[in-house]
Amino acid sequence: MPRFDLIATSTFGLENVVARELQQLGYADCRVSDGRVCFTGDEADIARCNLWLRSADRVLIRVGEFPAPDFGALFDQTTALPWADLLPVDAKFPVKGRSVRSRLHAVPKVQGVTKKAIVESLKKKHNRFRFDESGAEYVIEVSLLKDIATLTLDTTGDGLHKRGYRQVVGAAPLRETMAAGLIQLSYWNSDRPLIDPFCGSGTIPIEAALIGQNIAPGLQRSFAAEDWRWFDRAIWKNVRIEARDVRKRDLPAPIMAYDHDPGAIRHSRRCATDAGVGGSIRFNCQEVSELKTPLEYGCIVTNPPYGERLGDNEEVEAVYRVMGHSFASLETWGVYVLSAYRGFENHFGRRASRRRKLYNGRLECQYYQYPGPRPPFAQAGAEHRDAADKPLANKPSTAPSPEAPPSPFGTFVADCSTAAEATTIDLNRFEGLTERRGNVE
Ligand SMILES: C[S@@+](CC[C@H](N)C(=O)[O-])C[C@H]1O[C@@H](n2cnc3c(N)ncnc32)[C@H](O)[C@@H]1O
């Protein structure tokens, strides 16, 4: 089976979480940089990663990467890539484009030249002059960063956040991939109770239940590469069978989803049922002021209202103050809050011991982390979740963490070799970049 250079893309700030997930799936050769984790694999790896990655956006095949200071270089180098091995005669191959800090900044032209170069390459290899593009879709992206062109083929199709359980979108839903990232950045594991007191459409509790029950997040959906002629269909069938086999029926500790909006509770209940975890989550319609539990050493992971509109601030500040009072009695609990509101800590009444910049869509947020005391039942190695927050090269490990969902694929490979500088995610640098995007059909 041929091997491919693969890229798992992610939102900025979650790259190390994705690398950690890849490591748990058995991929040792991860290299982390802004918005992507590179590794290698074959067809079966493409299928597994699409099925299992929780925080990544897409799995791409890197077809080529080269300096492209001008259109001549872009055309020649693109033509030389092995497109005929990947695109059958009837392939439909739209070309998406983006350009960041590059001389070739006219994205539509970049896309046009790339498409023309691919057609030239296919003409030679397939011995044809015309391509009707009537078959399955193979989406190509040409991405220019500082004059380096990366050409990729998207194996995923709809982004990986589309798990298939949320048919109707709620008022201000969190992406499923972000919710999974927040959980994996916390110290929660399935032995600890979890509460989301502002659950909205239930994304955080549902993703926690999927993690706790070792359910592959992509089990209910299909992927672009499933329609590709050269991709062995039996592989997809097998990875799904494997995934069903490793699924756990129960959770050792409860997961609770609360919201004061009855419509949100109805909606989240329906989503949880569609995700196959309806029986694992306790729902209740209640105000955050009513939050009480006799349980200890749980985690609150939540995404309260931010107040994006003018005039919302007072309301949101009042909610944060109520949160501060309600959570104060949960002395043994860890608290993790994603908010875009800059004054969150002032109104909540406590400084976070850690903060992390994350983007909810285009909205800059902080993830405020109050890990709380270590549970007395915590097993040795519980610190491993912290590793998702740090360069992996600093965190070598030789055995699967007891907290990690078991790898469904047998062998656990411990370390991801990462260049230290590549794992430093400089979001300020990202914010300053001018990015242009476009599509060519
Ligand atoms: C940003 S949304 C949460 C979105 C959620 N993470 C999702 O993925 O759909 C905030 C939620 O908090 C709820 N909410 C606002 N104020 C509340 C309060 N005082 N008590 C309980 N829920 C509240 C809203 O009804 C809304 O569903």
Image (cartoon, rainbow, N blue to C red):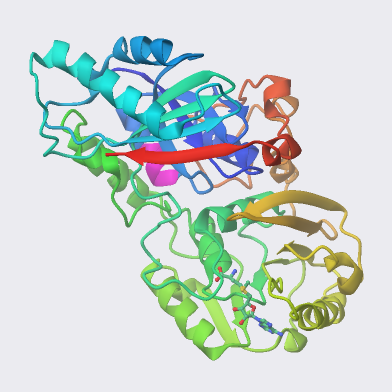
> Residue shown at 62%/43% (left/top)?
14
| Front residue (pair 335, 139) | 139
- Image-based side of 364 in relation to 349, left or right: left
> Is residue 169 at all visible to an observer of this figure?
yes
Q: Which residues are magenta?
A: 48-52
| Front residue (pair 135, 231) | 135
> Residue shown at 35%/18% (left/top)?
3
Q: Position of residue 164 (x, y in %)?
A: 36, 61
Q: Quadrant of residue 103?
A: top right
Q: Position of residue 172 (x, y in %)?
A: 56, 71
> Residue shown at 77%/87% (left/top)?
289
Position of residue 157 relative to residue 230, above or below, is: below
Quadrant in which ligand 1 is drawn: bottom right
Q: Position of residue 6 (x, y in %)?
A: 43, 26
Q: Position of residue 151 (x, y in %)?
A: 40, 24
Q: How many marks?
A: 0
In the picture, the quarter occupied by the C terminus is top left
- Image-based side of 374 in relation to 52, left or right: right
Position of residue 376 relative to residue 259, above or below, is: above
Q: Quadrant of residue 169?
A: bottom left
> Is residue 1 at all visible to an observer of this figure?
no
> Residue shown at 62%/33% (left/top)?
34
- Image-based side of 339 in relation to 207, left or right: right
Which is the main secondary structure of the residues drawn in magenta?
helix
Q: Quadrant of residue 365?
A: bottom right
Position of residue 437 relative to residue 289, above or below, is: above
Confirm whether the magenta stretch covers residue 76. Answer: no
In the picture, the quarter occupied by the N terminus is top left
| Front residue (pair 370, 78) | 78
